[in-house]
Image: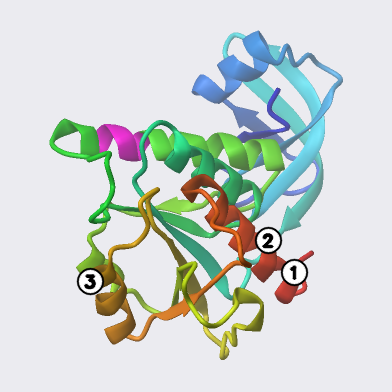
Amino acid sequence: MAHLYLTPELADARVGARVEVTGEEARHALQVSRIRPGERIAVGDGRGTIVHGVVAEAEAGVLAVVVDEVTHEPAPRPALWLAQALAKGDRDELAVQAATELGVAGVIPWAAERSVTRWEGAKVARNQERWATIVREASKQAIRPWVPEVAPLATTAQLARLPGLVVVLEPTADAPLTGLDLGGADRVTLVVGPEGGVAPRELDRLADAGAVLARLGTEVLRTSTAGPAALAVLNAHLGRW
């Protein structure tokens, strides 16, 4: 059951106002979650605003809430991003889901040299929409004020041009992630390779562009685990946990 429902119409939300959720969100609330009048729920716009209130109407594809509390959360800084290499099975999707729950600001699907899975042709738009659905649903479950952005499919050359601090998670790196100096960066992007790891020439290209290589302990984590683990480390380092 979703704990948060999303609607874009919250810019002028205030206590006492009536907020309506329609479309697929309302259908899910009414037919799947079985929300009924009198229940208190949360509604967010995915851009920092969440309202709480009592359901006044729950029928005919409309979920109406009378607002009794409004919160506005600024986007956290630095923004933590995850560049996740495409991986076989659902390992990249598992990483994106967990990263969303852990507060990532955005995710970048990365066509790494050693990625077995490839997004080509119609699969590019279809899989990007799939990732968008994953971050939306995970944000609702986590009651996140901000729904992460899903960036277009990126090449290694495009990762090398990303703004802010780029950190490549690499088991052979000398420096541990726990010792990373964020240096006042407004954005930090964690780069996670596929199951076969980041290719040497990709490491060289990213390092030449200013990326920092860092390791997570002595174990070699799977591609579905490394990104969320690193986000947990940075959340603790930044005092968010």
Classify mark 2: helix, strand or loop.
Answer: helix
Which residue is at a point 74% across and 40% down the rendered structure image? 17
Residue identifier under label 3:
201
Residue depth check, mark 2 versus mark 3: number of the one nearer the observer: 3
The N terminus appears in which quarter of the rendering? top right
Which of 1 and 97 lies nearest the eye of the viewer? 97
Residue identifier under label 2:
232
Task: Give me the C-alpha separation between circle 3 and circle 1.
Answer: 32 Å
Which residue is at a point 70% across and 14% down the rendered structure image? 58
Residue 27: x %, y % from top left: 57, 15
> In the rendered structure, which disc, 3 or 1, sits on the residue that comes first in sequence?
3
Spot the residue most to the left: 121
Q: Is residue 8 visible?
A: no
Which residue is at a point 23% across and 56% down the rendered structure image? 113
Pointers 2 and 1 in contact (CB under 8 A)?
yes
Crowding around mark 1 (Cα neighbors within 10 Å: few <14, some 14 to 19, many 20+) is few
Relative to 182, does residue 103 appear above or below in the rendering? above
Residue 56: x %, y % from top left: 78, 21
